[in-house]
Amino acid sequence: MTGWFADFFRLAWGLLYWNTRKPWFQLRRGRARCPCQSPSDSGRALETHCDAVVHWAKARRFRRVCPLLVETPDGWRCSAHTADVRPFWRRAFAYYGGSLAAVYLTGAIGVFIFLRVVGYPVNIIQVTWPPSWHRVGEARGWFFIEKAKKAFAANRTGEALLYLSNAYEFDPSNYAAGLTLAKTLQSGQPVPSNRVYDRLFREHPDQRETTAEEWFRALLARGDFATIQSLARDRILDDTAHASVWMRALIFASRQSHRDDVLRALRDSPAPAATVWRPLIETELLLLAGRNAEARLQLDHTDWRRLPPYGIYYQVSQLLVLGDGFAALDQLGSAGVTLDDETRITLQLAAYAQLDASRPFRQQVDQLLGPKLSLPVVKILSTQLIRQPDPVILDQLYAKLQQDPIPFTTESAGIYFSFLCAAGVQGDWAKFHAIGRIISEGAGISPPFYATVEAFFRGQSTSSRITSVLPALPLPIEVTYALIERYPGLPPGPSKSIP
């Protein structure tokens, strides 16, 4: 056995050594002796001893290095004349290649067995074929996603977060895993959440709009207005199809943060995507500076129809802010199809409420509640009730919701939470608890959650900012805007700017 092992290592070395010496001998023919034949012999075939085999335990094994060695009645001899001694690189490569392939396959099969025992859904091709190795990372990612789903179902949030982190680490191309991780982290761990969102934004350009929208929702719920300003500015400069949405987000964030530096920088930008918004930005800067008279002139004399759709919305909403509901209604009536029905009705209700025009206000509400109840109607009225509480309208909406119940689903969850907040703003705890029970049955949310939300609306929370509870509430953007405007929790002060 010892001799076999010794010859094995001699073979591994000899395949390289002798196949290197022989070409060197051929190049230096006549000036160097043959490296493997005995110099005392004739050098003729079948008569010359092989010096290379002297130390081998069995000479026959050397034939794997050089097949020129043959057995004769006189013993082992070289079958080639000295001049014909040559290397056998193909044989060497075959042995080395075969050995490497055997080691590789053995290791790959071992890895495959290990991964399957752990539970990763991989197949043998994905493990052994290098172009398919990325599939292993994907399989590991999906494995941890399934474990995260089970952990979430069992209400083990910490464990689920760990699994989601592993899933995204093993498979960064899995956009769904990264987005779920970012959304789950957004409430309790905002900094890691922002990092994941930023990575998704950079590494998945085809999903950039979706990422930006989800990121914005998370930032808005947390009240991270500085990051919203940066994100909105970048999306506006990218000239996306949703530039109006991002401009509204930028205006809202600038007001809440009392900073106008991003608006000033955007106003001065030469980019075509920014210059189209210059009249609106200049008007907003005047309002932020408290120069309302000059801002009103801008509102009256700017052709807002030349701006993207948000321009008309901005003009009407700012007229309401300045207390001129009649002018707001006039501009709204001439807006035509620039605004969608939901936006137009929302502004109409706000104008009627400001003017204390109860009759047209009630008529508009009756028109909304006349047909079968829909999700947009609940959202519109909940938003209005948050901005301007009205117990009569709240009763009407609640009665309609009981008459035309909307099944609690992922799609309808937002309007139930919207009504919950409207009831909380009104202080109608009977309706608050009734809607809370519907949500609990549909989403399985624990009572402490409602206790936290109720404590906020009762004024018993440690924080006066609605953003302390918003991250846990899946609300429509319009409702979130209304709640932050009602409960900003920030002391009023002059806007800050960078000259």
Image: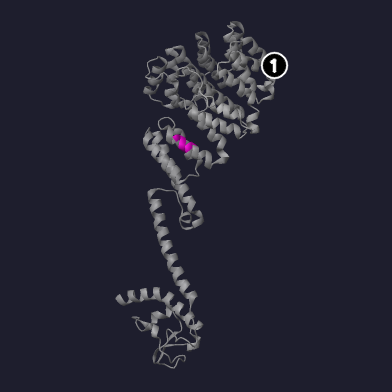
Task: List x then y, in percent, for residue 142.
Answer: 45, 44
Q: Image quadrant for the N terminus?
A: bottom left
Q: Is residue 403 above or below residue 33?
A: above
The magenta stretch spans residue 453 = no
Residue 235: x %, y % from top left = 58, 33
What amino acid is found at the position of numbered circle 1 in the picture?
A: Ser
Q: Residue 77 falls in which quadrant of the image?
A: bottom left
Residue identifier under label 1:
334
Q: Is residue 31 above or below residue 231?
A: below
**In front here: 17 or 306?**
306
Residue 452 appears in the figure: yes
Residue 412, relative to residue 46: is it above or below? above
**Magenta range:** 193-197
Residue at 40%, 80% in the rendered image:
62
Q: Position of residue 382 (x, y in %)?
A: 52, 17
The quarter of the rendered structure image containing the C terminus is top right
Q: Secondary structure at mark 1?
A: loop
- Relative placement, left or right, of 71 versus 282 is left
Q: Is residue 371 visible?
A: no
As for residue 195 lying within the magenta part, the answer is: yes
Q: Residue at left 42%, top 84%? A: 36
